[in-house]
Image (tube, rainbow, N blue to C red):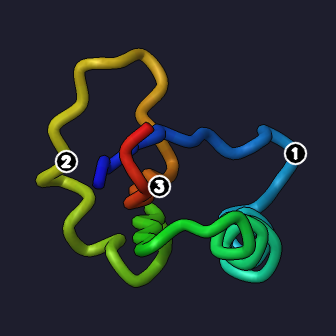
């Protein structure tokens, strides 16, 4: 089994709520439908806003989400 990790950035014209909704209602079911064994989506949204000062950022544009997917080894 392999774990794939993808950094994700939201479109500038989307709100955080639109981005979160799309990831959880469209992206997650689509990925699970491909045979992904496990899926984790971490989103920078209001739920984690209090921890924002603790973010370690070394990119001009920090990521808005991270998708981790566990799949069969090729």
Give me the C-alpha separation between circle 1 and circle 2. Answer: 23 Å
Which tag, 1 or 2, sits closer to the chain's start?
1
Residue at the spot of label 1:
13
Expressed as whole percent of the image width and height from the top left, the position of residue 26 reads 82, 73
Residue 74 shown left or right of residue 15 in the figure: left
Q: Which mark is residue 67?
A: 3
Q: Are marks 3 and 2 in contact (CB under 8 Å)?
A: no
At horizontal 69% and vertical 45% (from top left) the residue drawn is 10
Pair 3/2: label in front: 3
At horizontal 37% and vertical 45% (from top left) the residue drawn is 73
Residue at the spot of label 2:
55
10 Å crowding of disc 2: few (<14), some (14-19), many (20+):
few
10 Å crowding of disc 3: few (<14), some (14-19), many (20+):
some
At horizontal 67% and vertical 78% (from top left) the residue drawn is 24
Question: What is the secondary structure assignment of the residue under circle 1?
Answer: loop
Q: Quadrant of residue 15?
A: bottom right
Q: Quadrant of residue 59?
A: top left
Q: Which mark is residue 73?
A: none
Expressed as whole percent of the image width and height from the top left, the position of residue 71 reads 44, 56
At horizontal 87% and vertical 45% (from top left) the residue drawn is 13
Question: What is the secondary structure assignment of the residue under circle 2?
Answer: loop
Residue 8 shown left or right of residue 60 in the figure: right
Position of residue 28 relative to residue 16, above or below, is below
Question: Residue pushed farthest front?
Answer: 74
Q: Are marks 1 and 3 in contact (CB under 8 Å)?
A: no
Q: Quadrant of the C terminus?
A: top left
């Amino acid at each position: 089994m392999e774990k794939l990790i993808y950094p994700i950035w939201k479109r500038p014209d989307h709100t955080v709520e639109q981005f979160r909704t799309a990831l959880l209602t469209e992206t997650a079911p689509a990925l699970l439908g491909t045979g992904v064994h496990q899926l984790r989506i971490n989103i920078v949204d209001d739920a984690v806003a209090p921890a924002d000062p603790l973010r370690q950022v070394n990119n001009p544009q920090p990521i808005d989400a991270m998708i981790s997917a566990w799949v069969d080894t090729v």
